[in-house]
Amino acid sequence: MAQKVSSNLNSTIVQPQPSFPKVVTPQWLPFDKVTNEYVSTIMREASWPITKTKAIKYKVVTASFLKAVQEVYFSTIRQGNNNKGPYLGVRFKGEAWSLYPLVGKDIYKKVVLYLLDHFKAVKVAGSGSSNLVKGEDDKWSSDPLMSMYKLDFTRFPDWLPEAKFIEVGRPTIKINKAESRGQRERRKKLDKAKPYYKTTEAQHLSNDAHRASESRLQSLNKYWQQHPLVMQDGHAAACATRVYHDGRMDAGGRLYGAWTGIKKNTDGIKRRLYSTIDGEPVCELDINASQPTLFSSLLGYRLGGLKKDDIWSDVYSELSSLWATNISWSQHDPLIDQLELIRRNRSVSKAVVMALIGSGKAFKTTITDELEEDFGLTDQGWSYFRDALYQTIPALEMLEPRYDEKGQITGYLNGSGFLSYHESEMMMLTLEHLMALGIPAYPVHDCLIVKVKDSKVASQVFRETISDYCYKMSGLKVLVPLSVEALNTVNHDDLPAREDLLGTYLN
């Protein structure tokens, strides 16, 4: 290789570690000029296609390999350069890559094997073998282990840590399998991901619905590639996965992309707000108290606690009147000030509603561990908040328990089924309407990321789309309340005013 890793990293040797390898998944392309040229050079040296339609497949695998190497490098540095860093993981069995839409098995294996040899990666002894294991169904199956490789960073370009990539090849559709309450609890104890159907299995569940959902998302992904979301770290995102629940395509359906899991900075500001679209600053348009607001609107229930003008902003504190509630029945710091009390009570209200809708029990009797641990809420406090919120959100009476007495999934009118599906459909329709107007937008569940300059039009389209959808569902016409968030450095005159985002009923 013509270039080497900087001299201060030459001694870095990545040793095998029993968990969390950085896995090569075929979903990235180079995003900056230098990385793109380097990938093209590798492709020419390997005599792979560089101009034909198939060339993109080779480019995706090559760029994805380098992206995984970059992640190994950063993980090694984070662990103190102490020879105990992570390693590169590769899975060759078809089920590991079959969900990824851009590359087939043959090209993936061909390119990865070439690159492992090209960069002299050393396979960890014993990795990649198969063991027979007996599952809960008392059947034996093969459990392929990850093939793991140690890397010599001196064989990679010294600029690789600064290379930028764009994500374009996430799986389009994933359908998680239904789990009983017991299965779910056991899986969580083992810290395992939700089990999901393989592509062919998912298609057989509902072929027409699967094909239609995949087609819609492919159109959106294609549009996003023209207007990628460039994140604070310089990498870009232009694709998402739509994830359904419980083995059905009318439960869940939220979109997940590289931006959805981004956490806040240490200063408390959302890192997503530092992103750009087409080089322009962005903002977030968020539905206030989305779960109770949407659940009520979809079922045709008006909220309680409304003023005479039927205008409101927030369910959790304003309509419930819980914002100023005395919390003497809670374990708390007696020195808490009024502002902190308002913030705390709103957070408690939100957590209570989430617990009720998630469980499907409007009069859930037991407090959640999170509320007890995070807020010191007592049983008396739980009952007080629950009952006050039931008066504010009468649609809660329609909830159905998620599990029956035997722990089997039974109800649909709850957060995991009915609400999450219709919320995701409203979001998909909003994204498609904005795309038709030439406005790129990215979803974060019940929130939209758009350019600041597009925020006024986007907020109007967002609310009107939800209003039309709920009217068709229940006959209730409502404009849901939104809030807008942006960095202080942007021109806030370009953002919609608070009074233009208040919730109101139109019939």
Image (cartoon, rainbow, N blue to C red):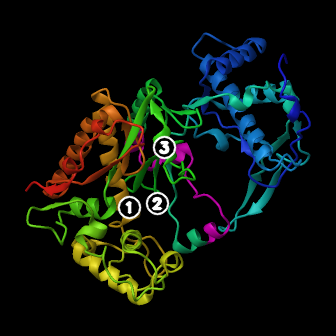
State the separation of the CA atoms marked 1 and 3.
28 Å
Q: Nearer the viewer, residue 179 or 241?
A: 241
Report the residue at 52% width, 58% height from top: 177
Report the residue at 29% width, 69% height from top: 317
Q: Label 3 belongs to which residue?
A: 272
Estimate how packed mark 1 is, as few (under 14), some (14 to 19) or many (20 or more) residues with alpha carbons within 10 Å. Answer: many
The tag earlier along the polypeptide, 1 or 3, is 3
User: In this rendering, would 370 be left or right of 46?
Assistant: left
Q: Position of residue 279 (x, y in %)?
A: 46, 26
| Residue 417 badge | 1
Q: Is residue 411 magenta?
A: no
CB under 8 Å between discs 1 and 2 = yes
| Location of the C terminus (image quadrant) | bottom left
Q: Nearer the viewer, mark 2 or mark 3?
A: 3
Count of numbered badges drawn on the protein? 3
The tag earlier along the polypeptide, 1 or 2, is 2
